[in-house]
Image (spheres, rainbow, N blue to C red):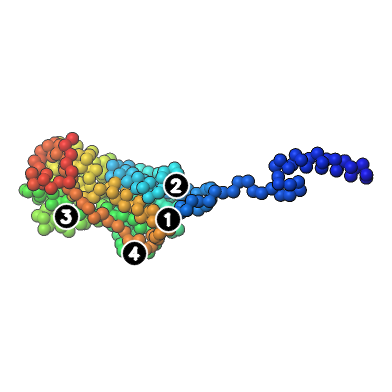
Amino acid sequence: MMKKRKSVHLVQKILCPLLLLSVAACGQQSAPVNNPTPAPAGNSAPATTETKQVKIGIAQFVEHPALDAAREGFISQMTKNGFEKDKQVVYDVQSAQASMDTSIQIAQKFNADKVDLILAIATPTAQASAQTTKEIPILFTAVTDPVEAGLVKAMEKPEGNVTGTSDMNPVEEQLKLVKELKPEAKTVGVIYSSGEVNSKVQVDAAKAVSEKLGLTIQEAAVTSPTEVKQAAESMAGKVDAYYVPTDNLVVSSISAVLGVAESQKIPVIAGEENSVKSGAIATYGIDYTKLGEQTADMAAKILKGEAKTADMPVEMQADMKLVINKKAAEKMGVTIPQAMLDRAGEVFEQ
């Protein structure tokens, strides 16, 4: 027993000086080494070394210039609001390729992933998202009539987990462009998707104002992109102009309408600016990039805890502008009045 005690004392004498190099005293607990650095005065970030990264699921019904512009405007404005891509926020961007079934699958994926917010671009993806989750905040954009689509109780007070921005067009102002370009026009052909609520709303609006403008609306409903050209051809010789509303299926296939219009010298009036860039003659309407930016401002308030979807009114874009494509007018055999050019917010010449 004596030899064992001496051995223990001998080990302590050897180890204690070595341990003193790393601790305050032999047999005492050392002080913490990695203390977090306190945040500087005025910094609203918590005094921790980690910040929660927000995840946003973006469900886009189909890819075409207007909806793409809304998406890019949203992401760009989120950066300005302090949510930089791959830093404060990560995006899961999904396209439904114009399929309602795929829209539902995307919504289910976002719900299972427990994303912090869903951005639904266009009515079908907004409807799919709203049907899938009542917990995750959903912001829509490029939805014409969210009340008719069953997304919100009322424009002023949604009363649920869904709100956003509407792209309702000034349909009457757009149809007036037909008479300005072609005063003798009597019949306007409208091609739209029978499966999109927003499109039927615009067709009904066109019918409501057509009589006082001295116009008759001729409809052609389609169910797939392959039917768009056939619908345009069926109207050739029967209509004086085409009107393309903000219908996702038709806009994604607008080249088919433009091909017929150019060959038959029938002017095309569009529901939004990007269709004019693609080859329609004119529109009086909204800027989808700005609509996306407007939606991002709403999203930032929700993510920062400054507002709730149930209390956020659906917003619309106040600033509309006349956009003209001079080259398209030439291809369709139309001369644009100088007065119309003078008041245009933007004129494309390519």
Mark 1 or mark 3: name the one nearer the start of the chain: 3
- Horizontal side, residue 77 vs residue 235: left or right: right
**Mark 4 to mark 2: distance in Å?**
29 Å
Mark 1 or mark 4: name the one nearer the start of the chain: 4
Nearer the observer, 10 or 185: 10
Q: Is residue 227 above or below residue 169?
A: above
Q: Give me the residue at 53% from left, 51% from top.
A: 38
The reply to whether the C-beta atoms of the residues labelled 2 and 1 are less than 8 Å apart is no
Residue 192 location (% of width, % of height): 24, 48
Residue type (three-letter) at the residue carrying disc 3: Glu
Mark 2 or mark 3: name the one nearer the start of the chain: 2
Residue position for label 3: 172
Residue 127 location (% of width, % of height): 36, 54
Residue type (three-letter) at the residue carrying disc 2: Gln
Task: Please indicate, yes or no, whether residue 96 appears anywhere in the rendered image.
Answer: no
**Mark 2 Cα shell of 10 Å, populated few (<14), some (14-19), many (≥20):** some
**Mark 1 to mark 3: distance in Å?**
39 Å
Kind of element beneath mark 2: loop
